[in-house]
Amino acid sequence: MDMITDAAQVARHEAARTLENAQARASKAAAAPGAAHGEYLTFRLGGEEYGIDILRVQEIRSYEHPTRIANSPEFLKGVVNLRGVIVPIIDLRVKLGCETAEFNAFTVVIVLNIRGRVVGAVVDSVSDVLELGGDTIKPAPGMNAQVDMSFITGIANVGERMLILMDIQALMSSADMGLIEDSAAA
């Protein structure tokens, strides 16, 4: 049991350190107007790696079992109390149709600020923060109408890694999620 506790502490420490470094770099980037790059928090869902805009990330927390809400969609795991704020927890694995993964010491919740609303997203693990230039990011491939690509902003190749870059705000604001009102300010 100590090994699991130690692994959870290491995962929390690494996630916090990664987020602090990313926020420091984002502050520097904001101070340099006209910088043509973006910083992305990368995370794993099953065998795939995804990236989201670091500026949407409020914090990274270890996974805690949420309070289930009756008659909620399968992807809505429930809610947690985060310092007095009730936060809905979305399992991105279920929402994106990934294979089911077990919850372990590396499972984390990325707490996001989407249009002024706090939302948590469960992911398998957080990888790192990457600064990507426009030449690294390629447009998402066109797909037929049956595949919803509206939240995919591009694909980035970083060494041997391929990252799927997503607009987490568009995903969390979609009508089927029911989390954010259309009238909410962007």
Image (tube, helix red, strand yellow):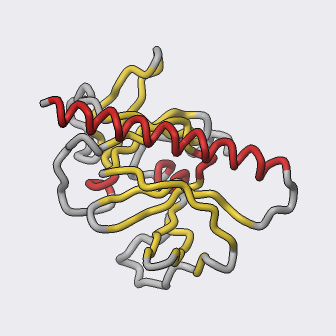
Percent x, y of residue 19: 54, 42
Percent x, y of residue 131: 63, 62
Percent x, y of residue 15: 44, 42
- From the viewer's side, name the closer residue of 64 and 152: 64
Q: Quick check: 162 left or right of 94? A: right
Q: Quick check: 119 left or right of 103? A: right
Q: Farthest residue toward the right?
A: 33
Percent x, y of residue 51: 50, 60
Residue 133 vs 11, above or below: the answer is: below
- From the viewer's side, name the closer residue of 104 and 97: 104
Q: Quadrant of the C terminus?
A: top right
Question: Looking at the image, can residue 155 be seen?
Answer: no
Residue 15 vs 158, above or below: the answer is: above
Q: Quick check: 172 left or right of 32? A: left
Question: Looking at the image, can residue 33 be seen?
Answer: yes
- From the viewer's side, name the closer residue of 70 and 4: 4
- From the viewer's side, name the closer residue of 28 and 56: 28
Q: Which residue is found at the position 43% from the left and 83% from the top? A: 143
Residue 28 vs 67, above or below: the answer is: below
Quarter-of-image position of residue 7: top left
Q: Quadrant of the N terminus?
A: top left
Residue 135 vs 186, above or below: the answer is: below
Q: Which residue is found at the position 60% from the left and 76% from the top? A: 137
